Image: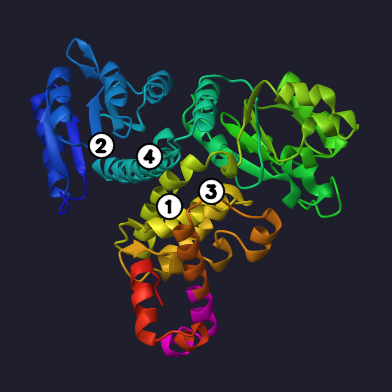
């Protein structure tokens, strides 16, 4: 097919007309399939890919409009062009309403007809690219990429599924780095709004004086730098989802306007008295205690109740450490693909380091650690030496402050101590084994042996 300009299905019940159209198109370099009826046409597209369908308005006792409608139902990417002897505004409007990209009038002016087909081919290409991009987004933000093994996250996914089936506002709470933005995207791409836009706004990143115009838009001249009309995020997200991240940072003045939108689906551009409407679902997130902000008068109670219809609390990673091994595998696969490496997994020692770290930065911190480890890894397995230094099991200060630890056998404690001291010596010696061995008071041969059994890289 690559040698052709494109693939066209010609549906025409008049044999002479069908042959004439088809032959002309073949001479122009198109690959052409022919059908004399709707039944034949549907059989052909079920077996052969067609980019454009040229369909006659009247197919004997059948309607070409109904065939176009069926084409679009079976394959939304196919681009139909209607051919009609009944040139009227009503015919054109009805053809386009049923899914036709354009129409041409008999007798066909082939010069104009070829221009229509070129535009139809470009439309097909754009639609295919959009479809592929949407599929990639839906794949990236599908529930199967939401990795967990813990009971708390099972409850979170249950709430996400309910939210995806609903049109209610959603409030996602949790510490920074727990994946609140990912949850918002998953809800959108699993909902009936998945074909609409998903727009995310990080409220603290916008100067307070510009938040209102960013969300609701502004008319030309509404403020000093408003040199032209600005479309706000609510208007741009019509038919989709608007994710408001860190909603706790929203000023009281803008909170009033957000509340009005949630109540009436109505808003005003800054500098305008004309009300506008938008069909937008709001998903909000925060790492702050909104209930406390309400009690302090810093967040409106009525807005809080409007947002808090479906509440999803995301637990920190330290409270669901059973998720760490699965997340590690997921991130290793992701970053190995990106870096072009064939990393198969992580050593037990390195995983033990991760399992014993509290991850104040949550999943984001874990992801960054694995990304670094994949970049630095020399072999097929990530070792402890590939992990960032700050991921030590516990610092000496922590050990001193916590008192004696009887949770491990003495042999394990000695092993941990040796590993820690070897790593420190290697770091101080700049990776030179002979110097590191001297610092440790052992032979270089003994150091090499211990590095091998402990899986320590250089």
Q: CA distance from mark 1 to mark 3?
A: 30 Å
Residue on which the image places disc 1: 331
Q: Position of residue 63 (x, y in %)?
A: 25, 15
Sooner in the amino-acid sequence: mark 4 or mark 1: 4
Label 1–label 3 contact, CB within 8 A: no
Is residue 36 visible from the viewing direction of this image? yes
Sooner in the amino-acid sequence: mark 3 or mark 4: 4
Sooner in the amino-acid sequence: mark 2 or mark 3: 2
Q: CA distance from mark 2 to mark 3?
A: 70 Å
Of 27 and 439, the residue lying toward us: 439
Q: Residue at x 17, y 49 (%)?
A: 28
Labels 2, 3: front one: 3
Labels 4, 2: front one: 4
The dot on residue 52 is 2
Labels 1, 2: front one: 1
Question: Is-magenta flag for residue 425?
Answer: yes
Q: CA distance from mark 3 to mark 4?
A: 49 Å
Q: Residue at x 47, y 46 (%)?
A: 324
- The residues colored magenta run 422-435
Above/below status of 342 relative to 41: below
Question: Where is residue 147, by image quadrant?
Answer: top left
Q: Position of residue 155 (x, y in %)?
A: 53, 26
């Amino acid at each position: 097919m690559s040698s052709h300009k494109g693939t066209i299905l010609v549906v025409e019940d008049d044999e002479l007309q069908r042959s004439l159209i088809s032959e002309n198109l073949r001479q122009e370099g198109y690959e052409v399939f022919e059908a004399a009826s709707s039944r034949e046409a549907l059989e052909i597209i079920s077996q052969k890919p067609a980019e454009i369908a040229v369909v006659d308005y009247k197919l004997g006792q059948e309607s070409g409009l109904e065939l176009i409608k069926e084409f679009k139902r079976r394959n939304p990417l196919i681009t139909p062009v209607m051919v009609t002897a009944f040139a009227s505004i009503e015919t054109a409007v009805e053809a386009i309403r049923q899914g036709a990209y354009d129409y041409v009038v008999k007798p066909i002016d082939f010069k104009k007809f070829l221009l229509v087909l070129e535009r139809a081919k470009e439309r097909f290409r754009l639609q295919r690219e959009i479809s592929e991009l949407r599929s990639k987004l839906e794949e990236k933000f599908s529930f199967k990429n939401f990795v967990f093994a813990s009971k708390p996250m099972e409850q979170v996914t249950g709430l996400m599924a309910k939210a995806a089936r609903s049109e209610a506002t959603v409030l996602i709470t949790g510490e920074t780095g727990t994946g609140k933005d990912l949850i918002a995207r998953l809800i959108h791409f699993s909902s009936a709004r998945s074909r609409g836009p998903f727009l995310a706004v990080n409220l603290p990143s916008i100067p307070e004086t510009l938040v209102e115009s960013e969300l609701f838009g502004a008319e030309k001249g509404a403020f000093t730098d408003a040199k032209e009309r600005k479309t706000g995020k609510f208007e741009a997200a019509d038919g989709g989802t608007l994710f408001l991240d860190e909603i706790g940072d929203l000023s009281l003045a803008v909170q009033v306007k957000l509340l009005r939108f949630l109540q009436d689906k109505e808003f005003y551009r800054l500098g305008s008295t004309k009300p506008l409407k938008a069909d937008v679902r709001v998903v909000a997130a925060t790492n702050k205690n909104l209930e406390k902000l309400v009690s302090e008068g810093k967040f409106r109670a009525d807005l809080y109740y409007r947002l808090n219809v479906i509440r999803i609390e995301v637990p920190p990673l330290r409270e669901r450490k059973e998720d760490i091994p699965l997340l590690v595998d997921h991130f290793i696969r992701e970053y190995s693909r990106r870096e072009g490496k064939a990393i198969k997994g992580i050593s037990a020692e390195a995983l033990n380091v991760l399992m014993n770290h509290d991850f104040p930065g949550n999943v984001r911190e874990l992801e960054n650690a694995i990304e670094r480890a994949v970049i630095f890894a020399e072999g097929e397995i990530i070792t402890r030496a590939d992990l960032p230094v700050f991921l030590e099991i516990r610092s000496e200060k922590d050990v001193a402050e916590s008192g004696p630890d009887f949770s491990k056998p003495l042999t394990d404690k000695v092993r941990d101590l040796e590993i820690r001291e070897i790593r420190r010596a290697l770091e101080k010696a700049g990776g030179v084994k002979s110097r590191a061995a001297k610092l440790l008071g052992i032979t270089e041969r003994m150091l090499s042996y211990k590095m091998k059994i402990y899986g320590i890289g250089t």
